Amino acid sequence: MQKKFRKYTRKQIETGSALVMVLLMSTILLLILTTGITWVLNTQKNTTETFKIQGQAGNVAQAGLQDGVSWFKRQESVQQTDTTTPNICKDAAFAPQYNSVAEDSDTDDASVGMVRDYEVKGRLYGRYILKRQNCSAAEDPHAVKDITALKGKSTTLPPTTFTDSGTGVTKIRGEGIVWYLESEGILYERNNFAKSGNVFTLGPDQAPNRILSRASAAVEISKLGLVLDSTPLTLFATGGTANNIGSRCRFIGGTTASAAVFYNGLNPNMTAAQRSPVLLTAKTARAVVSPQTVFAVSEEELRGMADNVYTSISQVPKNLKFSITFLDGNYTFDNVKPLQGGGLLYVNGNLTLNDSSNSLFSGVIYVDGTLTMGKDNTLAGGVVAQRVACNPGSGLATFEYNNNLITSVRQRLALYRENNLTHSIKQY
């Protein structure tokens, strides 16, 4: 049987060809779209991983800063004492020490500064470095340095200098009040785990190890001064207006009778009945009393160093923990909400303790305004105010000088602290 072939017209052939082309183009577009989506997802994933790695490097740098601040706090005072050794400088006091016992070691490499490696996850490791200054070379802006003089915090003006016996160069003597700390954080892949003692023999930049990212973090730390004499009962300073101290205002001191009240020009005329012991006498104050002269930092710097900053009475807790508290503005405490607690309290304004508020604070108080004391209130430790109004009509208001409390504040709170206003971090 003869098979018949169907004849296609030119139009039908062209239509079939067009259909094939459409199917082919659709397939190509689908492949392109799929590839594009895959590329976008991979790019997004890689970007996320990049940011994650960079963020982790920043965390490593931050960990270094915290370790550095802790080292300074453990030393209590980090101040240059040697001016006779050749090639010495104001920054030489930052000297973390290596110890073969890991728990007792400040660093993995004392010649560099403060260096630590630690595992992040698996082969992912972090290293932070706080560099020491090389006193025989130009100052490294990225190494730890004493910036007391730069910040105008020197106890002598101009700052004390000395002649370096190695170079003959006149240098500023370090006082250790303000330091600049910079920490480099390195995130890397560790592929060699060989150690000498408790330290890796190969660094992050030595093959087969591989650096993934770097970051740096920096902060200024200040040692809070606390210039309160050991002999006065309390410290008053008048800002042009006389103190108002009535007969029911009591002053209790220690065994010494050399001083009772510091004042600027206007004698509060305390009577014998107000003083215990009665031999306590008034004493002329310093010419200027300010946050700088008492704490070695400005009001704004103290605010940045405070553990808690409050801007209204409603924010203040019932009992202040033994810490640095900054009250911004005028504050009045009463029997519903008395002033209770301890530590260091700074009031940027007036402080009023109403009659019968039964306020009791132990530590150091600085009032940059008028301190008004009503009856049945006691402040123990040391008090500094621009003006004191203590004249209750009945009952007693008590200032108790307590050197032990002041020493406790100095030892527990006047350590090196970060100035949060100077904190910075950089990814690179």
Image (tube, grey):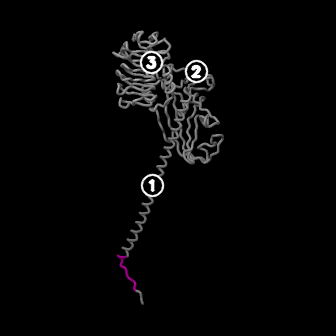
Residue at 59% across / 46% down in the picture? 190
Q: CA distance from mark 1 to mark 3?
A: 69 Å
Which of the two labelled residues, at mark 3 and mark 2, occupies the earlier sequence position? Answer: 2
Point out the stretch of residues depicted in magenta: 4-12
Secondary structure at badge 3 equals: strand
- Closer to the eye: label 1 or 3: 3
Residue 331 is left or right of residue 98, and the answer is: left
Mark carried by residue 400:
3
Placement of 393 over or under 33, stated as above or below: above
Placement of 404 over or under 270, stated as above or below: below
Q: CA distance from mark 3 to mark 2?
A: 43 Å
- Closer to the eye: label 3 or 2: 3
Residue type beneath disc 2: Phe
Residue at 36% across / 73% down in the picture? 15
Q: Nearer the viewer, residue 346 or 362?
A: 362
Residue, disc 1: 41
Placement of 81 over or under 21, stated as above or below: above
